[in-house]
Image: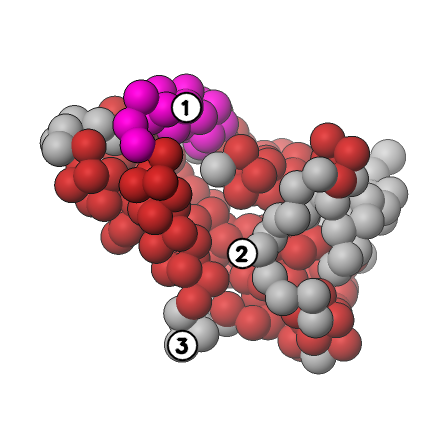
């Protein structure tokens, strides 16, 4: 879960750090798509939690409130996040205003960060339960998150965003995340990411998990 959250946080950091320096209309268009792709990825992650992780944990632990607080936190940032998404989709690339954009981010980002941080202790508290049972629940959630190929924009939007924000050098590279087949980064890089290549300039990593300088950071 920490690794998935790190992807979302790196994407958010990339938006905050590069947004003030985006000026050219073409760059604004790519930046807006990057922001929309990030929202889709955040929503996809939390959708998998609500569909699979939370209800499966409730059943396994026989505790209806085991993830109650974390679920309630979703509602605190969803509205603001989707308003930010709408704002970026309707943006006039010739009159981009970073201060107005930042205000939209600031309206929900603190609640999102609080949720991402609070969820980790909740997950760690599950260590009192059978580890194999927890592993099965996590596997179901993982399959939900990566398995629905019918999801609109999965390949040309969500996968490039995830790969472009997944730092494989984290903790000396001991984690295999995201858990994709070895060929997936190549497939995304050479095929699917090409649809919106300009947007992935804003990613903090390349499609293979190698950190790179932020293209628009000051």
Structural crowding at the residue carrying mark 3, measured as other residues with C-alpha within 10 Å and reported as few (<14), some (14–19) or many (≥20):
few
Q: What residue sits right under mark 2 in the picture?
A: 36
Q: Earlier in the sequence, mark 2 or mark 1?
A: 2
Q: Quadrant of the C terminus?
A: top right
Predominant SS along the magenta part: helix
Task: Determine the residue positioned at 64% across, 62% down.
Answer: 160
Q: Earlier in the sequence, mark 1 or mark 3?
A: 1
Task: Give the distance between the C-alpha atoms of the residues marked 2 and 3, in whole angstroms.
Answer: 19 Å
Task: Determine the residue positioned at 41% across, 23% down.
Answer: 124
Kindly identify which numbered label has been placed on residue 150: 3
Q: In the rendered view, tell whether residue 42 sits above or below residue 73.
A: below
Determine which quarter of the picture holds residue 86: bottom left
Task: Give the distance between the C-alpha atoms of the residues marked 2 and 1, in whole angstroms.
Answer: 31 Å
Q: What residue sits right under mark 1 in the picture?
A: 124
Tell which of 199 and 47 is nearer to you: 47
Q: In the rendered view, tell whether residue 157 sits above or below residue 145.
A: below
Q: Is residue 85 visible?
A: no
- On screen, residue 16 versus residue 8, left or right, reads right
Eye-nearest disc, 2 or 3: 3
């Amino acid at each position: 879960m920490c690794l998935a959250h790190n992807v979302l946080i790196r994407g958010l950091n990339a938006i905050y750090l590069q947004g003030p320096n985006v000026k050219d209309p073409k760059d604004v268009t790519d930046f807006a798509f990057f922001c929309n792709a990030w929202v889709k990825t955040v929503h996809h992650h939390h959708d998998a939690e609500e569909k699979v992780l939370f209800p499966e944990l409730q059943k396994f632990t026989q505790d209806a409130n085991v993830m109650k607080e974390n679920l309630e936190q979703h509602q605190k940032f969803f509205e603001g996040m989707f308003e930010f998404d709408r704002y970026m989709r309707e943006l006039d690339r010739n009159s981009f205003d970073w201060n107005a954009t930042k205000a939209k981010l600031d309206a929900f980002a603190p609640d999102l960060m609080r949720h991402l941080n609070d969820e980790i202790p909740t997950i760690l508290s599950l260590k009192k339960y059978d580890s194999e049972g927890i592993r099965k629940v996590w596997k179901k959630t993982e399959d939900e998150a990566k398995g629905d190929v019918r999801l609109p924009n999965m390949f040309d939007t969500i996968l490039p965003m995830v790969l472009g924000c997944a730092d494989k050098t984290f903790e000396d590279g001991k984690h295999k995340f995201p858990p994709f087949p070895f060929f997936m980064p190549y497939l995304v890089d050479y095929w699917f990411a090409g649809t919106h290549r300009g947007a992935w300039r804003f990613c903090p990593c390349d499609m293979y998990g190698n950190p790179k300088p932020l293209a628009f950071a000051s």
